[in-house]
Image (cartoon, rainbow, N blue to C red):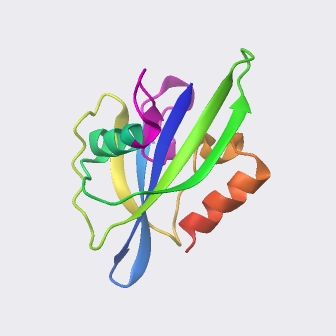
């Protein structure tokens, strides 16, 4: 199973901001996380990242770069692959989620005032956690 996510940064009034979504998923209802979700059968993981970013935030047209790729074993014994792409928006991009069945909200957060993130960092190995933290603190 693959999970594709995006870490999108921009500058708003000369300060770095990160785009996050508040999830409706039952297990972590209300937690903030990076836009992303499951890769559909036959879908390229980069295409899934672009699709999820658009569905959850309405943001399109941002070039993405592969930045983090790791796997972990699920309780069922299967392996999950997590892939994160990064992108930089030139200006503050308006957020208008297309599919609100998966999220409660989407918004830009100052990199100095990020909320506690959900499972993205708890499942990552130490090297991947370090890369993700570095990407959101640039």
Residue 102 x/y as whole percent: 36, 31
At 44% from the left and 75% from the top, the residue drawn is 16
Residue 23 x/y as whole percent: 44, 37
86 left or right of 74? left
Residue range in magenta is: 24-46
Residue 92 x/y as whole percent: 27, 69
72 above or below 118?
above
44 above or below 124?
above
77 above or below 21?
above
At 60% from the left and 44% from the top, the residue drawn is 120
Q: Residue furthest top?
A: 76
Q: Nearer the viewer, residue 102 or 67?
A: 67
Task: Find residue 9 and report its image quarter.
Answer: bottom left
118 left or right of 110? right
Residue 16 visible somewhere in the drawing: yes
Looking at the figure, which quarter contains the N terminus?
top right
Magenta residue check for 84: no
């Amino acid at each position: 199973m693959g999970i594709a996510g995006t870490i999108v940064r921009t500058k708003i009034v000369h300060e770095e901001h990160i785009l996050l979504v508040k999830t409706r998923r039952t297990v972590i209802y209300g937690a903030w996380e990076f836009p992303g979700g499951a890769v559909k059968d036959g879908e390229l993981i980069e295409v899934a990242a672009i699709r999820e970013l658009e569905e959850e935030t309405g943001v399109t047209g941002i070039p993405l770069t592969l930045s983090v790729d790791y796997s972990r074993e699920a309780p069922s014994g299967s392996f999950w692959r997590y892939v994160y792409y990064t992108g930089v928006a030139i200006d503050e991009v308006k957020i208008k989620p297309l599919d609100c069945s998966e999220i409660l909200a989407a918004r830009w957060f100052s990199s100095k005032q990020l909320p506690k993130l959900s499972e993205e960092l708890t499942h990552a190995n130490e090297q991947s956690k370090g890369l993700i933290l570095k990407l959101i603190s640039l």
